[in-house]
Amino acid sequence: MKSLALTQYRGPLECIETTTPVPRGSEVLLKVDACGVCHTDLHIWEGGYDLGGGKMMKMSDRGQELPHTMGHEVVGEVVAVGEEAMGFVETGRNYLVYPWFGCGECQVCKNSDEHLCPTPRYLGVLRPGGYADHVLVPHPRYLIDIPTISPEQAAPYACSGLTAYSALKKLGPQGLRKPILIVGAGGLGLMCLSLLKAMGRSGAIVADIDPQKRHAALAAGAIAALDPTKDDFARLVAESADGGIHAIIDFVGSPASWDLAMTTLAKGGTYVIVGLYGGERTLPLATMPLRAITISGSFVGSRRDLIELMALVRTGVDQMPIVTRPLESAHETLTDLREGRIVGRAVLVPGRSS
């Protein structure tokens, strides 16, 4: 089995050859058809998350060991199953992997919220992932039927699509009756626009500093795509959203995006923070009740959310821009993502030549 592995944080990925695993018990072995490259992978490559004030949540402290194979947005073909998985999945069939494995034993997992498990085992984060030609999945329940779309289009739904869908659900029907503000027009922001349209909800105004990404947002159906650094931003938002902005989804999660949200959100509004750029901000506590605002964190989504999302995709969702690369270009693709050179989502395709 070939994988592109992280052997030192912030270092180049290295090609490693290992014995292809043999599934046992409930395990399922997939041949990887496509694996998305996500901003979470960048945080892993950097060694952790910026908590602000010089503090960092280190991946090594979470139990990650090097060498490590990243990649959690995986579509693959079932090639072998353990004896306990027989009859639950079909050999030779493609599935989307729900990557947010929990321990399976705690009450959180039993409530079908494995993504919030206190002792997680996430694919590509804490166990070997899809930057490889094969991947081992611990149980067939993590394999999700996909619509008739290509593996490259399907793979980002495991994180990008799921994360956007889960964030939208946190706004509730009331929060989606009027245009919302989406901060960040990267892969998540564009995915959010396509899902909003498919859900038949009011559209969105998008804020992004990159003109190319603003252009992509308009092409994806944004009501307006604005540069938040310009002096006329507040006026243009007010013109685009009669009655003010009552819902914001922040796919950046930086001090600057926090400041933007706090100055834009109307009284009684909801601010959902998704992005993990990092940093810190202080909040005058009295403003919470005085403005009656709700601040919510949102981390990926549950397996039932992903099943719901696939049902929505079957009804028809505009496909977002996809850049496909061979597996060998994983490190170059991470670099392009870090430098903002990827519009939409980048997907690695094992077996594809450069």
Image: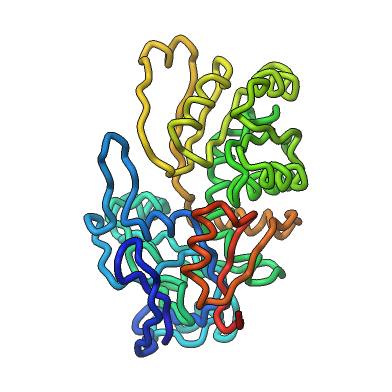
**In this picture, residue 124 sits left or right of residue 250:** left
- Taking the spot 61% from the left edge, 54% from the top edge, the residue there is 309
Q: Residue 238: x percent and y percent?
A: 70, 19
**In this picture, residue 243 sits left or right of residue 275:** right
Q: Is residue 269 visible?
A: yes
Above-or-below relation of 353 to 289: below
Q: Residue 236: x percent and y percent?
A: 71, 22
- Taking the spot 37% from the left edge, 36% from the top edge, the residue there is 279
Q: Residue 85: x percent and y percent?
A: 43, 80
- Taking the spot 53% from the left edge, 57% from the top edge, the residue there is 337
Image quadrant holding the C terminus, namely bottom right
Q: Is residue 104 visible?
A: no
Above-or-below relation of 323 to 276: below
Asked where in the image residue 343 lies, by quadrant, the reply is bottom right
**In this picture, residue 85 sits left or right of residue 243:** left
Above-or-below relation of 334 to 94: above
Asked where in the image residue 289 lies, by quadrant, the reply is top left
- Frontmost residue, 111 versus 171: 171
Image quadrant holding the N terminus, namely bottom left
